[in-house]
Structures are given as structure tokens and as C-alpha cells.
Amino acid sequence: MTPLKPYPTNIPKTLDGVWNALLQITRLRPQDIGVVDNLPNQFVAGRKVNKIPASSTDVADSQPGDFNCTTTFAYYCIDDAGTVTWVQWPVSSF
């Protein structure tokens, strides 16, 4: 089993920065196939939360790695040089 990369904590506030952070906390399907029988012991960095932040500073009860999305935006909570903040980017089809 290939372990997940270390949890990203200092993520640039750019689309590429957030995208790279999401790539670090996700696994590819071929990786999951090998561990499907061990699901109770699998760890996923970050957590999907039941919160859509009202602004980048809406950080009460938030921690870096939290994420959520709507039909129009995806949100990811990061540690920006010691300051917890939310970033968002538009969701579009391709």
C-alpha cells in the first residue's frame, strides 16, 4: 500500500496551490483497489465539513484541511503562514 503524502499545511492561495493540496490528500483508484478489504483502517487527511464559509475569515471551528463544496464553488481551509483562512474556487465542467 502506498501511504498518503504528509498533510499539506502551507498552501499557496492560488488555484494551482489548492489543486496540488487536494492531490496530496486524495488517492487514486488503483491505490484504493489494493486496500478495499482494509477500509476500516484507512486514513484520509482533511475532513469534509458541514459548513459553507461566509468569508475567508469565517474560521470558527475550522482547521486546515477542512473542505466542502456547492454546485458553484469548492472551499478549502488552509494555514496561510500561521493564519487559518478559507479559499474558494469556481466549480466548472470540462
Image (spheres, rainbow, N blue to C red):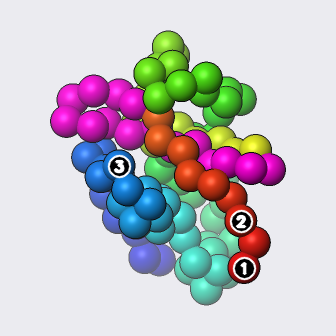
Residue drawn at the location 64% of the way across and 64% of the way down: 38
Residue 58 visible, this orientation:
yes
Where residue 39 sits: x, y (%)? Answer: 67, 60
* Three-letter amino acid code at the position of disc 1: Phe
Question: For the magenta stretch, what is the residue range?
Answer: 71-85
User: Would residue 65 be found to the left or right of residue 29 on screen?
Assistant: left
Q: Are marks 2 and 1 in contact (CB under 8 Å)?
A: yes
Q: Secondary structure at mark 3?
A: loop
Q: Residue furthest bottom?
A: 30
Q: Earlier in the sequence, mark 2 or mark 3?
A: 3
Is residue 27 a member of the stretch shown in magenta? no
Nearer to me, 72 or 1: 72
* Three-letter amino acid code at the position of disc 2: Ser
Residue drawn at the location 74% of the way across and 50% of the way down: 72
Is residue 78 a member of the stretch shown in magenta? yes
At label 3, counting other C-alpha atoms closer than 10 Å, the crowd grade (few under 14, some 14-19, many 20 or more) is some
Nearer to me, 33 or 57: 57
CA distance for labels 2 and 1: 7 Å
Residue drawn at the location 47% of the way across and 77% of the way down: 1
Q: On the image, numbered disc 1 is attached to which residue?
A: 94
User: Would residue 3 be found to the left or right of residue 76 on screen?
Assistant: left
* Three-letter amino acid code at the position of disc 3: Lys
Q: Which mark is residue 68?
A: none
Residue drawn at the location 43% of the way across and 76% of the way down: 2
Where residue 17 sits: x, y (%)? Answer: 36, 60
**What number of labels is visible?**
3
Q: Is residue 61 above or below residue 53?
A: above
Q: On the image, numbered disc 2 is attached to which residue?
A: 92
Q: Quadrant of the C terminus?
A: bottom right
Where residue 44 sits: x, y (%)? Answer: 53, 53
Q: Earlier in the sequence, mark 3 or mark 1?
A: 3
